[in-house]
Amino acid sequence: MSGGTVMGSFAPYQAFAVGGPSSVRGYGEGAVGVGQSCLVSTSELSSIPLGGIRFKTRLAQIQVDYVINAFQHGTTYFGISDLIL
């Protein structure tokens, strides 16, 4: 769970964007909405038991997710974490 608020007047680029890989996957960054305050909680509904795919190597963990939004538009997300240099 994450959240925050911006006090006073602010430029549009300082707003919290809801949508994208870190909040609502399947939608573009800010496609769900933008605002002065934001609270994001993660929850997932999967109709296919497989979900995402994770590969753990000695150098990093590689993640591949495919999501479909309410408009039946599919998006693939790739991620690399725990990178050892």
Image (spheres, grey):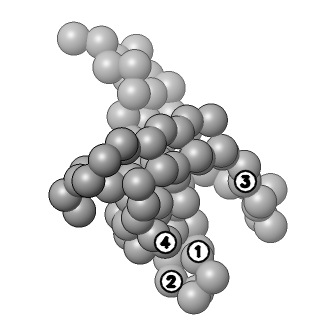
Please state the horizontal and vertical placement of residue 13, each as a whole percent of the image: 21, 57
- Give the image quarter of residue 80: top left
State which mark lies toward you, 4 or 1: 4
Reading the chain from its start, which is encountered first: label 1 or label 3?
3
* Closer-to-camera residue (10/13): 10
| Residue matched to label 2 | 73
Please state the horizontal and vertical placement of residue 22, each as a whole percent of the image: 46, 47
| Residue matched to label 4 | 32
| Residue matched to label 3 | 44
Q: Kindly indicate whether the residue at mark 3 contacts the one at mark 1 (C-beta within 8 angstroms).
A: no
- Look at the picture and state if 28 lies above or below 59: below
State which mark lies toward you, 4 or 3: 4
| Residue matched to label 1 | 68
State which mark lies toward you, 4 or 2: 4
Reading the chain from its start, which is encountered first: label 4 or label 2?
4
Q: Residue at x 41, y 73 (%)?
A: 31
Q: Kindly indicate whether the residue at mark 2 contacts the one at mark 4 (C-beta within 8 angstroms).
A: no
Q: Residue at x 72, y 53 (%)?
A: 44
* Other-residue count near label 1 (Cα within 10 Å), few / some / many at <14 / 14–19 / ≥20: few
**CA–CA distance between discs 4 and 3?**
17 Å
Label 1 residue SS = strand
Label 3 residue SS = loop
State which mark lies toward you, 1 or 3: 3
- Tell me which amino acid carries mark 3: Glu
- Tell me which amino acid carries mark 2: His
Q: Kindly indicate whether the residue at mark 2 contacts the one at mark 1 (C-beta within 8 angstroms).
A: yes
**CA–CA distance between discs 1 and 3?**
12 Å
Reading the chain from its start, which is encountered first: label 1 or label 2?
1
- Tell me which amino acid carries mark 1: Ile
Q: Is residue 34 visible?
A: yes
**CA–CA distance between discs 3 and 2?**
17 Å
Label 2 residue SS = loop
